[in-house]
Structure formats: structure tokens, C-alpha cells
Image (cartoon, rainbow, N blue to C red):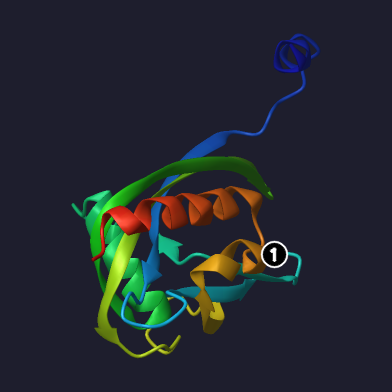
Amino acid sequence: MAHAQAQQQGQHTLPTVEEVSSGGVVVDVTQPGLPVAIIARYNRGGRLEWCLPKGHPEGTESNREAAVREVEEETGIAGEVLAPLGSIDYWFTVSTYRVHKTVHHFLLRATGGRLTIENDPDHEAVDVAWVPLKDLGRRLSFPNERRIAELAREVLPQHVD
């Protein structure tokens, strides 16, 4: 309704850009507490946010392949996908356009690597940490990612011995 009213009054709405990212909940199933690697980054307003690693697929990558690559680039931890965890979507505005972003999340089992942000090609991550799976929801900044963390807690027992 507001969009139609704006057009009738000669006002312009911002153009919309669709974006897709993939990421994951990477769990070290060999350690007590089932730690999960998460990253910290500063948002556009300068606030520190703890979030799940994610990023855009490159070339012909599938969402699954992009999730594995992004998790390793942003956390230093290699992983293998155990299960899809679903998708979330949200909107935000950049100066001249609106972005509708869809993020596909996967549950990954850590297979190696060392916790580091040194391999993040975009240098968005400013910190990285292992957080016990049971505490993950309290550490993540965004409610939609907290729901993904809860789903990971529910699904993980079906995929590990």
C-alpha cells in the first residue's frame, strides 16, 4: 500500500538488490562442549557483532560448497557438511538501494585447521572464537542466527556417534 501511494505521489522507492550467501555452524565434535567457531565483525554503525561465518558463492559454486569455503576462510577451520540447517532472509538499506539477502546455513563437522582470521580475503572478521554449542545462542548478535544455532543443537545428535 505505501509503495503504491509513493508511486502515485511521484515519489521513488529505492531499487532492490537480491543477494545470496552461504555459511555454517562448524562444530568440533571431538572436544568437550562441542565448540562452534564464530566470528566478530563491525557493522556499518561501528558496533561489534558476533555471527556465524558466511559469504557469497563464487563462480559456479553450490551453496554447500560456498559454505565450506567461507567457513574456512573466515575461521581457519576446515569442515564437511553434515546437514542443511535451512535459510534465513532479511532486508537492509545501503545508501542508494535496499538489499534482500538470503543466507543458506549448513551444519559442518570440523575436520582440521587452526582458528584464525588471517585467511579472510575481505578482512571483515576482526576476531574469531570457539563457543560451546550450548552457549552459542547467547553469543550470537542476531535472533535469526540464534534460531539456526538452536536447530544445529537439535540436529547434531543425528549426525555424530
> In the image shown, does 38 or 12 lie closer to the viewer?
38
Answer with left or right where residue 102 lies relative to residue 95: left
Instruction: Pick the quarter of the image with the N terminus.
Output: top right
**Residue, far front:** 161
Instruction: Pick the quarter of the image with the C terminus.
Output: bottom left
Q: Residue at x 72, y 14 (%)?
A: 7
Q: Residue at x 42, y 90 (%)?
A: 118
> In the image shown, does 85 or 121 lie closer to the viewer?
85
Which quadrant of the view contains residue 157? bottom left
- Residue 35 percent location from the top left of the image: 45, 77
Q: Which residue is drawn at 81% across and 12% down?
A: 9
- Residue 24 percent location from the top left of the image: 39, 61
> In the image shown, does 160 or 138 lie closer to the viewer?
160
Is 109 placed above or below 12 here? below
**Residue, far right:** 9
Label 1: which residue?
Answer: 44
Is 13 placed above or below 119 here? above
- Residue 117 percent location from the top left of the image: 45, 85
Is 49 placed above or below 1 here? below
Residue 32 appears in the rendering = yes
Answer with left or right where residue 93 lies relative to residue 45: left
Is 70 placed above or below 5 here? below
